[in-house]
Amino acid sequence: MARSIDIMKDRQEAIEAGCDVLGQGFPIAIPTETVYGLAADATNPAAIAHIYETKGRPRFNPLICHMADLAMAEDHAEFDPVSRALAEAFWPGPLTIVVPLKPQSTIHSLATAGLDTVGIRVPVGFAGELIHAFGRPLAAPSANTSGKISATSAEHVEADLGDKIRLILDAGASAVGVESTIVKIENGRVRLLRPGGLPASEIEHVAKQKLLRSRRASAAIEAPGMLASHYAPGAAVRLDATRVEENEALVAFGSAAITGAANARIVLNLSRSGDLAEAAANLFDYMKKADATGAATIAFTTIPDDGLGEAINDRLRRAAAPRE
Ligand code: TXA
Ligand code: MG
């Protein structure tokens, strides 16, 4: 079992213990507003290698580098006017911006998978304080075994990775519940690389333009978060369900009655009132709960595609995709 520190009870102890293990070159689990991260010193190749090893990632992929603030980010990367405007509007928050690395950046190429760009975000709250105290960027993918559902609580992390890591910093359930939105600015145009916890419409409002959405088939940036079968529970996943079949768990959205719900292995509702933020926050936890019933299939009812629904539906489509 990993040592766990409740940051609400002992914030200072959590920061000191966190900096200590990070400084020794090992990853720790940290709470962020999106999901829990498996964080390591982004300037230390051995520490980054431990992230891949702990997650069982099959190959090296670019990791998001987390910064204390925009000033720290500018030590490592070049911000064009649009990237800067987005950073100023949304950081700290669930937005990752892919920007060109500066030649003097100390971020190791193992964190960027050798690309000349880096995905950067400034997380809300405790994680930002921890990075400020540590003084260096933290590379952090979600704190789960590769291909599995992302962790949105310290209990999820403990159950999955507890015997592989030294420290879990516990701040309760992640408020947003899905990973950050990732964008990249190309000649002043904003491209959406991954829908996430910041709705696309909010980015369009600040950038004063429609987002480019077509994915480019660049192998260099193909990464687990983009693989079709990522976020897979043990059970099969069925989308747009209007009734519950034999041996299914039901994860509903909204207040409509669903035929056969009485026979479901479990009935969970992401948001009875139809609130997409509430649904995003519950998504991964309910996937795990439904999976834990041993149901053959998890049936999800339809979730609208606007706002945070885009990120929720992206994760659900990947969970429902044929497994590799
Ligand atoms: O919410 C989040 O973003 C969570 C929490 C822990 O902060 N982190 C997360 O990190 O999801 P990670 O490392 O799993 O995200 C990796 C994704 C890759 O799938 C890739 O799509 C994108 O970030 N990425 C990172 N660097 C990139 C780059 N230089 N160019 C293009 N995409 C990049
Ligand atoms: Mg992940």
Image: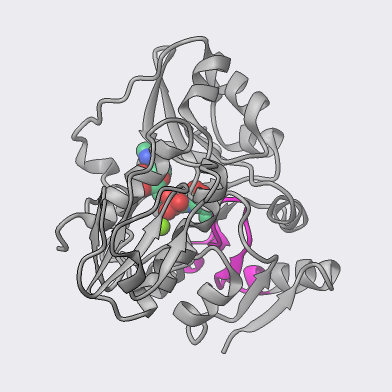
User: Which of the four quarters of the rendered structure image does ligand 2 lie in?
Assistant: bottom left
* Camera-nearest residue between 41 and 283: 283
Image location of residue 32, percent across then percent down: 62, 55
Name the residue: 26% across, 52% down.
241
The residue depicted at 54 percent of the width and 80 percent of the height is 158
Q: Is residue 43 left or right of residue 195?
A: right
- In the image, 26: left or right of 310? right
- Work out whether 227 lies above or below 116: below
Q: Is residue 161 among the parts visible in the rendering?
A: yes
Asked if one can make out residue 105 in the rendered structure from this viewpoint, the answer is no
Q: Give the quarter of the figure containing the N terminus.
A: bottom right
**Magenta region:** 21-47
Up/down of 208 relative to 3, above or below: above
Quarter of the figure with residue 71: top right
Residue 38 in the magenta stretch? The answer is yes
Counting from the top left corner in percent of width and height, residue 133 is at: 77, 56
